[in-house]
Image: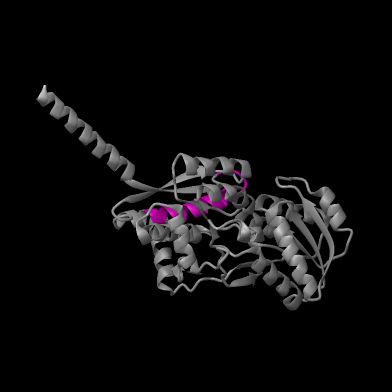
Amino acid sequence: MKKNLRFGFASIILMAVVFGCGQKGTIKIGAVLPLTGDAAQAGLNTKLGMDLAVEEINNTGGLNGRKIEIVYEDCQGQPKLAVSAMQKLAEVDKVPAVVDNSLSTVTLSIAPVAEAKKVVVLATGASSPKISSAGDYIFRIWNSDDLEGEVMAGYTVDSLKLGQISVLYINNDYGLGLQGVFQKNVETQGGRLVAQEVFQPGSKDFKNELTKLLKNKSQAIYLVGYPTECSGIIKQLKRFGYRGLILGTIVMADPIVQQALKETGYVCYYPVPKQPDLQNPSIAKFIEAFKKKYQKDPPMLADVGYDAVKLIAMGISSTQEYRGETIKNYFYGMQGYGGASGYLKFDKNGDVKKPVVVVK
């Protein structure tokens, strides 16, 4: 009887050790990305950088001896799906931090959940000015539209010498944010918006909006939207016989928008983060490692995905605590980090400011 009892206790202890190791074996980090849908390319590019960072961390001993893993949730670029994904990551997976991608509407939709659950959200591409005041747990390593809109407006008036501009923008937080900043800065610098039209997310036919917009003669159209919509608008502008310039956002760098510009022959100006110094050891190391893993150059947003994982890992390692509050406090107190996407330092709003240039 005693022998069986000892065996029973030993079995319980063994099971506790096994299950304890299972629970402590990995450190989970969440990700809410558009892996399918119109914005999928942005999400997939971000994922490439994240996976590389995870591989590097795990190959060098993990975090305090524990490997990390990313729990990916596909939000398809839809705020409702993103909220459900965020709730699942916080309540079921118990992650302390979530990497978010390039859609401001998604970031703003999950921010209340993150605040309530004390889970850090680190956005890699969301740019709405509203994100600056979305909460203490909300951070981003992409410039706010406040900076992008200011730079683009200044270039439009001062460098291109354009005084009459039209604006066509998407009806969501992203579009409204950029439209407001652009208008304010154009008018402050002596330019004038002769017409403004708004289109709904997911639209495929822009005939009504373009008909109204093109009644007013302008030298350029400032276009704010996502890749699929922007490429469709550019092609329809050609059919309408528009002959002016196109001004845009970082979205213009997307391959399908570039193809539309090539097909139509339009000249487009848009802002991008200043090319990082390729001689910088951190950046050079990232590019070399990315090429070795994927046999290609890093696409846009791969570097910020990589940096996001590295930053969260640093936050967890700082006190060896697996809590959102720990990561939040680390980010606010961080002196600065030389990452793959450049120098990163969070201000009191959880924002960074990276140099921006305009390209043709």
Instruction: Tell which of 284 and 7 is nearer to you.
Output: 7
- Magenta part, dominant SS: helix
Q: Residue at x 87, y 54 (%)?
A: 212
Q: Residue at x 62, y 59 (%)?
A: 133
Instruction: Tell which of 351 and 49 is nearer to you.
Output: 351
Judge left or right: residue 178 versus residue 277.
right
Residue 78 sits above or below residue 298 on the image: above
Q: Quadrant of the N terminus?
A: top left
Q: Residue at x 76, y 68 (%)?
A: 184
Judge left or right: residue 359 versus residue 310.
right
Instruction: Tell which of 299 and 46 is nearer to you.
Output: 46
Q: How are the residues colored? A: one colour
Q: Indicate the position of residue 175 as horizontal and vertical percent values.
A: 71, 56
Q: Residue furthest front?
A: 2
Q: Quadrant of residue 158?
A: bottom right
Q: Quadrant of the C terminus?
A: bottom right
Q: Residue at x 77, y 66 (%)?
A: 183
Q: Indicate the position of residue 197 as horizontal and vertical percent values.
A: 81, 55
Can residue 48 be found in the magenta stretch? yes
Judge left or right: residue 155 versus residue 241.
left
Residue 67 sits above or below residue 306 on the image: above
Q: Indicate the position of residue 178 as horizontal and vertical percent values.
A: 71, 61
Instruction: Tell which of 169 and 329 is nearer to you.
Output: 329
Residue 217 appears in the picture as rendered: yes
* Residues shaded magenta: 36-54
Residue 270 appears in the picture as rendered: no
